[in-house]
Amino acid sequence: MFDDRTRDACVVVPGIMGSVLEDATGHPLWGVDLAMLTRPSDGEGFLGALHANGQEQAADADTARRDPVTRIRATALLDTPWWLPVFEGLDPYSDVHKTLTGAALAPDAVASFPYDWRLAISYNGALLARAARAHLTRWRERVAARSEWRAAGEQRPRLLFAAHSMGGLVVRAALKQDPELAADTRTVITVGTPFLGSAKAVLALNLLNATTRPRWLLQRVQEMAATLPGVHDLLPGYRCLDRGLDGERLTAADVARFGGDADLAAHSLQEHACHRDRPFVIPGHRAIVGEAQSTVQTLEEQHSAGRAVAAGRYHAFDVGEGGELLRDPATGIPARRNTYGDGTVHTPSAQAGTQAITYVFGHHGTLMRHDEVLRQIRGIALERPPSVHLGGDGTGAGPGLEVPSLGGSFGKPLPLTVTGLTTLAGATLSVRSATTGRAGHPLTLRPSPDRTDGALSARFTADAPDLYRVTLKTRMYPPISQLVLVSPPNA
């Protein structure tokens, strides 16, 4: 009996930062040793090596099919927790791979697609289309060779994609470029995918204006991000610039003022325009959306020392079906509301393109280890209908966890905030090392003195520079966690 197994070929597609990168000699450049982020002597070199050169910036789908770039190679999915300023923490993908393996006929039905997330989504989409076709062909041959598997169902195996963040955009590009592959795809599960983009991409390009330490890391990340097509492909395509009496979409000139590359921005924003004009329907699309977390949704342009500063705002504009701003009838002021999100992707961006949505309370980078996300992925893989879930309804009402998006400095208390709780009964907040598992002491939550929304706060002082996992547990919902880096004091 194989009714508790899927016959499909499964592909796990990670998000930005989620693939281990090496140079042509096999020297690791990303995702292996956290010292890359804590020691300037190590970090400045590897972040410099990750800058995209002219050939890499120009790489597109045709390049992938004709002459792929090879200066840097993606060799595996991330298998250790990672972190960057603004983008924040990212958990490994081992749990989702294990979940799909447990739902498949055999382990080799599940493949991973590491990719060079620095490069354009269209380029990586073409590589994924080729890799997914090869994986499906091999798996169909394997199933055809086993009589008991052939008897388990008449239909030939198809493809199932489980994609996180940017990975969902890569899958969309692959299926749009290859209609035959789209026809061979049963379902695409996207987890926290920014279909409309993310305002955090602008904040990453604008890091030179941040005042937080370590300055060397913020500067090097900004310099790297400004060269990367992949980061520019995450720019928001919706109305994200709050001009007071108007809400505007970004232009390439705006992005250049904020620290990005005008040419890369122009290409990304043109892609957004194409998707608005001719939306591509992802086959069997199921979206898993993180909600209730404090999320930057729009930006306000300010100026300091002659430079444009992108200030994040925690509201979005209400728009009509045609994309026009909805305004107050009496004043003409644009309607604004907090749509929340997963801390990186605001809710409308992750919802776009489908009505088959599951909501969970969780943070962007840790969603692929979230108990409810893994349960939903297994249920979809086994073709069970969407079940009652322990998430919300997209309104943002529920528990939230806030940690400093630029990290902290050793020796200084780290402020942590919990939102959306109606009672402290059964709620605990704890911190432990994400690298060693070493546990810290449970923290005491108290009403936050500078908040009027009922938020609770606590402070954590690290006993060593490290990457830490902050976890909020409640009686009603699965735990919510977030990663935060505490840097050495003189970094």
Image: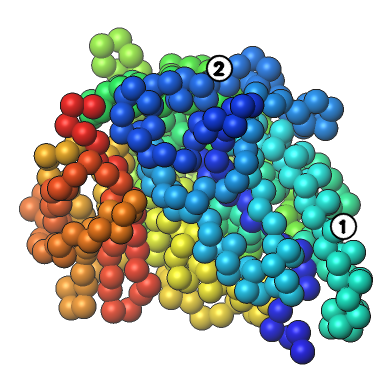
| Label 2 element class | helix
Residue 262, numbered label: 2
**Residue 470 rendering spot, x and y as whole percentages:** 27, 57
Q: Is residue 257 above or below residue 234?
A: above
Left or right, 399 with reference to 61 = left
Q: Nearer the viewer, residue 413 or 308?
A: 413
Residue 475 appears in view = yes
Residue 137's disc is: 1
Q: Are marks 1 and 2 in contact (CB under 8 Å)?
A: no
Q: In the image shown, does 455 or 109 lie closer to the viewer?
A: 109
Residue displayed at 64% across by 56% down: 12
Image quadrant in which you'd find residue 390:
bottom left
Disc 2 marks a residue whose amino acid type is: Ala
Separation of residues labelled 1 and 2 (CA atoms): 41 Å
Q: Where is residue 224 drawn, in percent x and y?
A: 47, 23
Color scheme of the displayed model: rainbow
In the displayed structure image, the side of residue 120 where residue 451 appears, left or right:
left
Query: Where is residue 47 drawn, in percent x and y?
Result: 45, 25
The C terminus lies in quadrant? top left
Where, by quadrant of the figure, is residue 73 drawn?
Answer: top right
